[in-house]
Amino acid sequence: MPKADLYKISITDGKVLLRIPQQLIGAETANMDDIQAELHLMGVDYVPEQLQEIYERTSGEFDFLTDFKTTGFTLQIELSKDEAKAYLNIIPPMEEEEPLTLERIISVLKEKNILQGIHNKSIEKIIAEKIYFEPAIVASGKETVQGRNGFPELLFLPKKSRPAPGTRVNLREVQVLQKVQQGQELVRIETATMGEDGYTITGKLISATPGKQYRIRPGRNTRYNPEGTHIIATKSGVVCLNNDSISVEKVKVVEKVDASTGHVRFDGIVSIRGNVSDSCSVEAVRIDIGGSVGKARLRSIGEIHVAQGLKGAIVQCGSTLRANNMTNTQASVGEHALVDEYIVNSKIYCGSTLQLTSKQGYASGGVLQAGNLIRLPNIGLPGTDEPNEDGEYPENELPQTILEVGISLKNRKQFNELEKNAQESLHSLQDDLKEITTILEELQEIGWDETKIGKLTELESKANKNVSNTFSDLRKREAQDGINELNKSTNGGAVFITGKIPAGTAINVRRARYNVLTRTTDKAYSFAENGIQATPCKELLKRYQEYFLKLTV
């Protein structure tokens, strides 16, 4: 707080007046040493007892301290705490012998080590208009301009559905499948800015924080424009978002999958309006199912959406799995799993987060694993929260529910394998390019040769495959990098259960085990120095809320 807000010294008609506002409990107070130093700088002779009396009285009014006679100007300089501004308070003499000049004020500022941002015009105005007894800004540093984050403008969406400009969009939360035409602009990319450094009036550098680049890249059937500002569709189809890439895929619409259709395998998006029956399988880049799934197999390198339930299914999903409910299901999910109502006797593994979205939702039995975070409303089947005739809860009769967070050893092994595979593909590509170069040089010397042309075509196909494999493995590795970073931020992960938690529930965090011994509610389980600790969900959930997937579009 500036000194002017803590006390005020005024000279009027040759009298020195001092005002000290009434002090509030807990507020910053005027410092006696500061007052005495300022009076000394002004050359004021006073009776110390009179000053002490005014200081203790703190009437909030101007009190007479002493008479004042001077022949020179007194210049008081005060700096703000962050050294961003300098204030000048001029106290004129009773009898002016020498006029005040710009040069003198600048000299006093330099004595205070104020070297930059001096406002000459403001000082000249103060002198010309004789602005005395009122602190005025006479020097300012340069404010730091922080870097602006990059963001995408999703041009493929209708204008009303697009996130506001400047919003950092999570592509996993954009679920609209939009038809686009060849050559259509899909995304405009606003690049991040570096920001501008600032400085204080004493010349200290204040570094700006650069903005973060937004990462979205062309996938299949898309490319950058020559300027690199837009991603454009190279074929007509439906937009598909997967991790940090955007692609345009063909769509195959199927009424249902059963014995009459057989297995469905398609290099694009499969949209099934009805159900998937037992003993069937569906493989695609992305799978959308309007009904339910029986004892079938689903496999997708991207997202899987099931409008109703999964009952006895086996699921492999490279990105995000969304379903209404799951029973006796086994699912391996690359990143996020969102289930609306319940999960019963299922084994689910998610790379990053798993959550039940309904407030009345529940998980019962089975093993639920996530690399980072799990959020559930309740554990145990509905109706089991009432005591029996003996006043005991039937927890011992319920199947045990095991919840686990943390990067598994299997996951770490996969991460290392991806890095190894990417390096091997890259080395193979380099070998292919060398051989291609050699053949081209030979063809220039000897002319057309059917054998070498055939070999060249074979090498080109192999090189393209190595390029594709390298990029695919690197992108999977980058996604895993993000999961690993979040795991560090969450100290190994956390489990949130906002409702009931029956005795017998087992919770593992960072391979440490916690057994719930007595019935409880509203607990967050996280790792601390002494092992797993249980605390109310509110504070920890507030800290990690941003990492859970939200459906915004």
Image (cartoon, grey):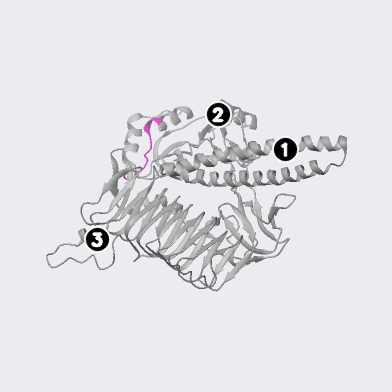
200 lies left or right of 1: right
User: x and y percent of residue 309 in the render?
Assistant: 42, 67
- Badge nearest the viewer, 3 or 2: 3
118 or 55, which lies in front?
118
Magenta residue check for 435:
no
Q: Does the magenta stretch mainly form a helix, a strand or a loop? A: loop
Residues in magenta, as a range: 25-33
- Give SS at disc 1: helix
Crowdedness of circle 1 by 10 Å Cα count: few (<14), some, many (20+)? some
What kind of residue is marked 3? Leu
Crowdedness of circle 2 by 10 Å Cα count: few (<14), some, many (20+)? some
> In the picture, which quadrant includes the N terminus?
top left
Is residue 88 visible in the rendered image? The answer is: no
User: x and y percent of residue 87 in the render?
Assistant: 54, 37
Q: Which residue is mark 2?
A: 72
What kind of residue is marked 1? Leu
Q: Earlier in the sequence, mark 3 or mark 1?
A: 3
359 lies left or right of 471: left
Q: Which mark is residue 433?
A: 1
Crowdedness of circle 3 by 10 Å Cα count: few (<14), some, many (20+)? some
Magenta residue check for 30:
yes
Q: CA distance from mark 1 to mark 2?
A: 84 Å
Q: In the figure, 162 relative to 48: above or below?
A: below
Q: In the figure, 350 relative to 323: above or below?
A: above
At x 48%, y 69%, the residue is: 276
CB of mark 1 within 8 Å of CB of mark 2?
Answer: no
User: x and y percent of residue 141 in the render?
Assistant: 59, 37
119 lies left or right of 334: right
Q: Earlier in the sequence, mark 1 or mark 2?
A: 2
